[in-house]
Image (cartoon, helix red, strand yellow):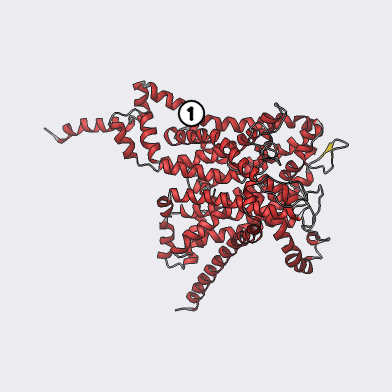
């Protein structure tokens, strides 16, 4: 083997090692973050943490029951609005999306996926908070729905496009009208994928804070009224992290651990629903 | 009977077929099936909501920002006074802070993210690909505010004790590392942003590299290239526009990222070359000051900040998508990165 060939092989080996090292370095922060979350958060989690609302500043004890329930309600509101529109848009893209309008909608969805969520927050504030004169969980849900729709549109489209055309043709050949073919055969077949898309979107919006700052606002008391301010875990973490009390910082870590746990639970469920599809890669 | 005579009708038939294939849409429309038309109408209506929403956001921001834009004109972008009492607003410090913190994040994140993407698609043994890919996707699932919390209580103390002293010893003479480091700073903002956008850039570039046809690699290696040479000369150039797009998507993310940055960047309307000093970003200004805006002009100035942020991120995202689509046509790359 010539010296040149040896040098080229050595370079290949070195670069492979370098790339592997960079990859390892990139994953390292994740391990640190998870480690710190468990280390600093787990000790503060007990039964009271889940069933009690926060106590006055400076006192010890209290929990985040209001924030857990609030997160659930606001995410549910977002799903109520976001899932029909997002999935409908996705079906449009997959079934009728080969023309110019399809290109436009696809492009806008992708671009909106990158819109800063804080901008969505001030948009929702202008339309849903300022006119009525008070903050509300409803406005928060609407803001989150706006973040959900473009994500869901694209994942739904991808999943529906995976359905083999032969299924569609078989249904049409049996005399099904196109709309029934689309809903009862195509969408039904892609249902697992659509559910995954929805779960992935839920996992992402559940941790959103910025769009809720001027809409749901936060609430230190337990509240289930959707036309009033409502607390979420993300808002609670923000308030506690910026506060001056050690007790608050402790609770912030615990709330972050709970939020992270919820998000991971949803994300892993999403993967599990379509495990065979992801397994290919 | 010649062969030509029998061939002719067939050819004509084939030609007709080729020029006017009966598309399903056309056939269905002729059938005038009420259900089909209603279905197409409803779906089209839902899909149209997306472009309308984009227009509504842009329009509303422009309308609300108009009073400030009219009063301060384009100088809003490069003057640095932000005085709610005197009602004088200039966004230069936050525009500067947004751009610098995001560029700093790219500087750190791009090599790491491309390392992950190249390793996952080209070098990693098969059993590593799935778990590592999953880990990267999990990193993308961590909420912004959790990164912020970690930044405040872990990253900043780490920077203060372990990272900044050597940096100051090496580069303290440059203006970029001058002054006293208190913690909340441009540097902290850039580093937390870098950690946040690594998984995003990695996920998109990974999908771009997966879309590179296998024959690119095979041809290069068939000519005697080593594995690295195949990647460097055949795979990366093929996916170049897509990777640039992935980096730009990450840049767009970093520009608009709010909570984590707000918690660590210091939130001060200052223009300083030093990375160790507090700074501000547009998103952080909105998060901090929007509910405090007491006058119409203050509110309008904040809307103007939102408009600038929106227009810049939309433009960067649009360009990035077009670049990514050139390699991975029409796919929703990055959608699996949550």
A215 vs A100, left or right, is right
B13 vs B325, left or right, is left
Position in image of residue A138 (x %, y %):
63, 33
Along the line of sight, the residue nearer the viewer: B158 or B328? B158
Q: Is residue A217 visible?
A: yes
Along the line of sight, the residue nearer the viewer: B217 or A69? A69
Position in image of residue A8 (x %, y %):
50, 72
Query: Callout 1: residue from which chain?
Result: B
Residue under the point 44% across and 79% down:
A1
Q: Is residue B272 above or below residue B71?
A: below
A13 vs B60, left or right, is left
A158 vs B271, left or right, is left
Quarter of the image where one finds residue A108: top right
Q: Residues within 10 Å of mark 1 (few under 14, many from 20)?
A: many
Quarter of the image where one finds residue A180: top left
Q: Is residue B200 visible?
A: no
Q: Is residue B74 above or below residue B131?
A: above
Q: Secondary structure at mark 1?
A: helix
Which residue is the site of mark 1? B44
Residue under the point 81% across and 32% down:
B297
Residue lying farthest to the right in this orientation: B86
Quadrant that contains the N terminus of chain B: top left
Q: How many marks?
A: 1
Position in image of residue B191 (x %, y %):
69, 57
Along the line of sight, the residue nearer the viewer: A131 or B227? A131
């Amino acid at each position: 083997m010539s010296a040149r060939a040896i040098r080229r092989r050595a370079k290949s080996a070195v670069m492979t090692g370098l790339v592997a090292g960079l990859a390892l370095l990139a994953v390292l922060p994740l391990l640190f973050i998870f480690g710190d979350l468990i280390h600093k958060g787990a000790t503060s989690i007990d039964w009271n943490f889940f069933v009690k609302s926060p106590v006055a500043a400076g006192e010890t004890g209290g929990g985040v029951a209001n924030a857990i329930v609030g997160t659930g309600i606001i995410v549910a509101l977002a799903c109520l609005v976001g899932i029909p529109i997002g999935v409908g848009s996705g079906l449009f893209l997959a079934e009728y999306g080969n023309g110019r309008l399809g290109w436009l909608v696809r492009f806008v969805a992708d671009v909106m996926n990158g819109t800063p969520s804080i901008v969505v927050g001030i948009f929702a504030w202008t339309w849903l908070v300022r006119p009525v004169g008070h903050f509300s969980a409803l406005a928060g849900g609407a803001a989150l729905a706006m973040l959900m729709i473009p994500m869901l549109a694209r994942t739904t489209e991808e999943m529906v496009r995976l359905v083999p055309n032969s299924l569609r043709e078989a249904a049409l050949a049996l005399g099904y009208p196109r709309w029934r073919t689309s809903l009862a055969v195509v969408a039904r077949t892609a249902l697992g994928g659509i559910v995954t898309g929805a779960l992935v979107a839920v996992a992402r919006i559940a941790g959103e804070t910025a769009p809720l700052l001027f809409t749901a606002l936060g609430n230190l008391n337990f509240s289930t009224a959707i036309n009033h301010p409502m607390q979420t875990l993300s808002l609670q973490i923000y308030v506690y992290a910026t506060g001056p009390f050690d007790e608050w910082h402790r609770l912030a870590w615990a709330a972050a651990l709970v939020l992270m746990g919820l998000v991971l639970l949803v994300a892993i469920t999403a993967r599990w629903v379509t495990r065979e599809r992801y397994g290919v890669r | 009977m010649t062969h030509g005579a029998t061939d002719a009708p067939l050819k004509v038939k084939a030609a007709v077929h080729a020029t006017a294939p009966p598309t399903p849409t056309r056939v269905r429309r002729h059938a005038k099936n009420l259900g089909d038309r209603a279905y197409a109408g409803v779906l089209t209506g839902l899909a149209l909501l997306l472009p309308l929403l984009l227009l509504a956001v842009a329009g509303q921001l422009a309308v609300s920002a108009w009073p400030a834009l009219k009063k301060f004109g384009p100088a809003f972008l490069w003057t640095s006074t932000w005085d709610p009492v005197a009602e004088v607003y200039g966004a230069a410090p936050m525009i500067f802070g947004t751009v610098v913190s995001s560029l700093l994040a790219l500087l750190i994140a791009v090599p790491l993210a491309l390392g992950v993407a190249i390793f996952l698609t080209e070098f990693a043994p098969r059993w590593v690909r799935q778990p590592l890919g999953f880990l990267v996707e999990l990193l993308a699932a961590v909420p912004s505010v959790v990164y912020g919390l970690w930044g405040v209580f872990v990253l900043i103390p780490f920077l203060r004790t372990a990272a900044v002293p050597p940096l100051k010893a090496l580069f303290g003479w440059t203006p970029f590392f001058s002054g006293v480091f208190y913690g909340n700073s441009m540097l902290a903002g850039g580093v937390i942003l870098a950690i946040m956008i690594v998984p995003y850039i990695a996920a998109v570039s990974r999908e771009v590299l997966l879309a590179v046809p296998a024959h690119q690699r095979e041809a290069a290696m068939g000519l005697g290239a080593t594995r690295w040479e195949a990647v460097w000369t055949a795979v990366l150039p093929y996916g170049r526009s897509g990777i640039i797009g992935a980096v730009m998507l990450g840049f767009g993310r970093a520009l608009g990222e709010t909570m984590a940055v707000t918690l660590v960047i210091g939130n001060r309307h200052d223009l300083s070359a030093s990375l160790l000093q507090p700074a501000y970003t547009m998103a952080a200004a909105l998060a901090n000051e929007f509910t405090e805006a007491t006058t119409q002009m203050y509110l309008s100035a904040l809307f103007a900040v939102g408009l600038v942020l929106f227009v810049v991120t939309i433009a960067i995202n649009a360009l990035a998508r077009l670049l990514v689509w050139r390699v991975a046509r029409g796919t929703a790359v990055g959608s699996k990165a949550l």
